[in-house]
Amino acid sequence: METGHKVGFRLGGRHTKLLVTVLLASLFQTTALSLPAVYAQSASTTTELTRQTSFNILAGSLSAALMQIGQQASVRLSVNAKNIKGIRIAGFKAVMATQDALDMLLDGTGLIYEIDPSGIIIISRFQDAISVDSDDASLLPVIVTASSGDPVGWQGAPEWVYETPRAVSVIGREEIKNSNARAAADLFAGVPGVTVADNPQDPGISINIRGLQDQNRVNVMIDGARQNFQKAGHDETGRFYVDPAFVRQIEIEKSAISGVGGAGAMGGVVNFRTIEAKDLIKPDRSYGVEGKLAAGTNAYNFNGNLAAGIKLTDNVSFAAGISKKNLGKYQAGNNGSLEFSDTGQPVVFTGSETLSWLTKLNIDLNDDHTLVFGALGFHDAFTNSTIGGDFRNDSDITNITGTATYTWQPDDSWFDLEAKLWANRTHNDQYRLARTSSGGGFDNDFALNSLGGSLQNTSQFDLSALSISWNYGIEAFKDVGKSKSKPDESTVDPDSLWIGADPSGERNVYSAFNQLAFSYKDLVELNFGLRYDQFNLKGTSKTLEYDLSGNTSVVGQNISNSGNRFSPTFALAITPLDGLQFFGRYSEGYRTPTVMETFLGGEHTGGGLPYLSNGALRPELAKTWEGGLNIQLDDQFIENDTLRLKFSYFNRKVENYVALASVAGVTFDLGGFQYQIPYYQYANLHEPINTQGFELEAFYDAGSFFAGVAYNRSYIDLPNAFTFNNPYTMHGNAEDRVILLNVAPKSKLSANGGLRFLDERLTLGGRITYVEPDGQFGFFSGGYKTDDYTIVDLYGSYEFNENATLRVDVNNLGDVAYVDALTAGEFPSPGRTVTAALNFTF
């Protein structure tokens, strides 16, 4: 099913409709309008309707309440938005059967429900159900509102995205499943304001949101577990590793937040939510299996995965999956020009072989208490090098993430509690081949172990027409970096200085937060948030010192740093009309220094370039203003069509930005010739960095056809000179001193549209992507040589039945030779690639 497919079905044939009409009319005469609901049950749906569920339904619109019912009871609901427009309900918390919850919500509204043969609960007005002419082709309207997880917007975004008064984007499950992505980076091509720094030789990616990336400026998580790994190189440093095969949904916050996940980060939050048993098991089954087999041209050799879920008991379910991907050395496009490589030729070392796995256990201790244990693993072996294939590094990457989540949702509006513990280990065992004929190779082994947890609760209560929600809690995490270097020849690096910019050290971050939301009759919403962050770093660093004659000595130092701050957020949203919301927001983000930035020491691997630690680094501070609007329209142009739109403008100032720079070093005399050896150090830039821009995403779906667009434009103000806070230098020209600042593209446009045929089982569509890169900043920016590029993709899918769908993609139809924006190392992207994938379930 293509992303954005309307969620809806009509009732069965004419005789079914006539029978339902007669039954409803008879029942209406005997109940004198006192019934709250009518439903037709089948053996497959009785269990779902009668199953006891712990409901937590917020007071407000009936539309939002039905979405919560669908999400919390894992059922699919159908209703025409016009039938529930303007209806408000009182919230409730209770453990009850789904049918009782629906009875409570619909009582007195004049609405009824019944079960479609496919198991969907269809809600309609009572008078519509008993007055429909038996010759009419339709008895009930097609669904336009369903559970909050159903895709209705751009890239399968659920309904809540367009009800959220801030800049947030979501990539939905269907979009992820349908994508024959070569790497996880491809999933973000259509997200406005988000760009991925993608080195095609490395399966890890670094996410850039509104120009901020690396060093945990953007907090990337898997099921709430932080992926804090940093690995130094001549391009991006922060890389994380995940296989899209097991990802259910990707949620993207584009600025600082006050809730869980916001500690120590300022550029936004990206959370990859993975699948669990209920995503694999159909309502009438106790087990389910989901898989994919894909292959293609241009070295897309194989991509396959298999996941299974099973209900062990009524209260215990388990899911497990395995994924394998084999990619070879692809060819660049033929059409166009490349500055550093040949068009139409294989790109060196762009192959890899990835193996991933997932396990997840869900335990309902009773109606109020739930435990979820998850583990996710990723392994890949690959080689990276310069564009010419020299300076080769062989890497063996392993990423393992574990989570444990406990929720307590009693029949009490004051409590909706979640406690989470998580751990992550990312390990890169890298062997660097000899750089010169005189020296051998060496191992450069680096691992980052992260451990953390959070505790939060949400209390809800009403004061007359005012609804109040209060979210508060704590979170904390620890990073421990371990690095070692071992040359093949022990005499080459006797002092073990070749740890380079991947030092050992420890970082601890603690945070407390609370946020209050006040809502007045769904017309006005006020949000106030306040976060307190505290951090400390401790470790040792080796510094290579030179005397005036050029002799060296190694000095070990104990380094520590600490700090704290309160960071506020404020937001206002106004909904003057149903489906139209205006919002404004101010946020402050506090980014704490990382292990890499603080304990940098030793030398560049191979020697010759000394590094200098900085225990006096100040945390970065981002202040962001943003405003925008949400639009939700149904049945406006064509019956049963939907339009979802989100627009936002932002203006952000970053103070104390931390950059790696060349700072003044010692000058010594070599027989009358003076030579200065510079140090490389992470330092605060005194002048702020200002960025502003706007983002738009919109999606229109009329069933038989659909179209969407995403666009962003950004403007960044970079000073010509910086002042560094270190004892060696106080002034410097930015282009000469700063190693590299990642600058997001000036603009990015993604358009997607298509047609559906054969009862919407056949989908044919296409995408256009246009990117206008910006010039990178610093003396390493020479590795970023990109021009504007436009890429056209075609795709088609055919749904044989509910269990099997074939998908064919033609990516880069024009075989364009281009380099992705933010891709350092001069590596071009793949040329024309055709892939075919079979998605199946049973």
Image: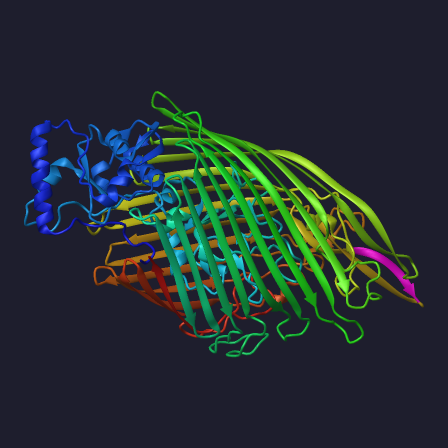
On screen, residue 27 versus residue 415, left or right, reads: left
Which residue is rendered at x = 6% and y = 45% of the image?
133
Query: Residue 438 versus residue 653: which sits nearer the camera?
Result: 438
Which quadrant would residue 304 be assigned to in this image? Answer: bottom left
Q: Taking 538 as reference, is 78 left or right?
A: left
Across and down, in percent, residue 275 comes to 43, 50
Q: Is residue 470 magenta?
A: no
Q: Which residue is at the far top?
A: 464
Residue lying farthest to the front in this orientation: 313
Percent of width and height locating residue 726 = 77, 47
At x 49% / y 65%, what residue is drawn?
A: 325
With 593 as the anchor, is 352 left or right in this view?
left
Q: Give the range drawn in magenta.
A: 664-670
Query: Can residue 672 be seen from the camera position used here?
Result: yes
Residue ID at (34%, 37%): 68
Q: Is the magenta stretch mostly helix, strand or loop?
A: strand
Residue 144, compared with residue 436, is above or below; it is: above
Q: Does the magenta stretch include residue 666?
A: yes
How many circles with numbers are drawn on the protein? 0
**In which quadrant will I find the C terminus?**
bottom left
Residue 521 placement (x, y as % from top left):
33, 28
